[in-house]
Amino acid sequence: MGVTLQDIANMAGVHKSTVDKVIHNRPGVSDKKRAEIKALLEKHHYQPNPLARAMNYQKRAMTIAVVFPSNIDSADALIAGMQLVIPDFSNFNIRIDRRVVSGGAEEQAELLRELKKEKISGAVVLPIADEKVELALREYKDAGIPFVTMNSDLKDSGRLAYVGQNMIQSGRLAARLFDIGMPKGGTIGIVTRRDLHALRERESSFTEAVNEHYPDLTIAAVTDLTKSDASPYDQTRKMMEEHPDLDALFITCGDVPEIVHAADDSRKLRSMKVICYENYPKITYLVKTGKIDCTISGNLETQGRLAMRLLFEYLVYHKKPEKEIYYTTNEILIRENIGD
């Protein structure tokens, strides 16, 4: 029989609640005693008793917060992936508290702090790229609340792991696809949002690849949707009017249907190459009808499923992720292989 939590507590001369604090990286234990307990846990290969934890969580609910910005079109697919994990942990009293932030970084940081006061057990967060949010997440680490970032990352936030698309690879991939699809070269307009770290990486890696490897391609215009309160449709129409000779449209962000609609209403869409990201019903329709040439999927359901599983396994079994970053596969989808 393996060593128990009480056994470790007896060896260290502390109450078992102190050992639990060390396991979950919560405050209230001196550095010296924390190091001693960690050494004992490692020496005796401590493994929690899942049955005992299940019985404990049947009495005390475990609340997992899921925090998204409101402008993320991919939220439903990510949530669908998370739901796939829940049946595997049906013996545990786990509740998912989904929260959507309609404002910016300050509101997301405030919400994260409110959730911390509510004593959540953990969180899955799609973070806005801002120091305020990063600071709020560091407070989670200090409080011993594990969290996984998903879809977009803040690497210095103290997160347990990141699950998402390899954004640098996906940006370079898009540049190569434009090169293949536009053998005579041409001008490209970019529509993006710079409030998410992931989208910044997509845009910058795409720009670097175009400038370094594809001299016949030119980035003629960039529209950052976060710079104006105007709708994505209106901002795209403005870019099209100011740059009527654009040959292609690169969409790094969500709001794809509005952006494509604006290009279509500008009477330029039929002559343009359009590349965007992800695969949900509205994008599938636009690819199948020929209004989008290609989309690069980051397998959103896989992201949601893996992010939630990593967090559940850490909370329930104290199983730390094997690595810090989990990249999903970049999949090129065109009309012939995008599915129903």
Image: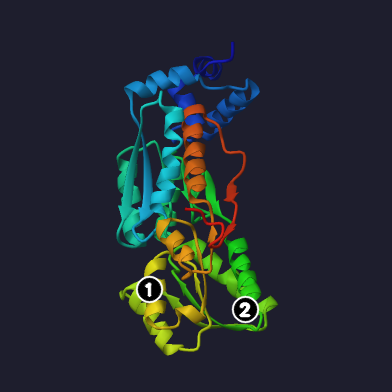
Q: Is residue 221 visible?
A: yes
Q: Residue at x 50, y 33 (%)?
A: 314
The percent coordinates of residue 64 (x first, y second) are 38, 38
Q: Amino acid at mark 1?
A: His
Q: Amino acid at mark 2?
A: Met
Residue furthest right as drawn: 213
Q: Quick check: 295 above or below 8?
A: below
Which residue bears the numbered disc 1?
261
The percent coordinates of residue 26 (x first, y second) are 45, 35
Disc 1 crowd rating (10 Å Cα; few below 14, some 14-19, many 20+) is some
Disc 2 crowd rating (10 Å Cα; few below 14, some 14-19, many 20+) is some
Which residue bears the numbered disc 2?
182
Q: Residue at x 37, y 78 (%)?
A: 235
> What is the total number of numbered labels drawn onto the structure image?
2
Marks 2 and 1, Cα distance to the nearest angstrom?
22 Å
The percent coordinates of residue 257 (x first, y second) are 39, 67
Q: Quick check: 336 above or below 212?
A: above
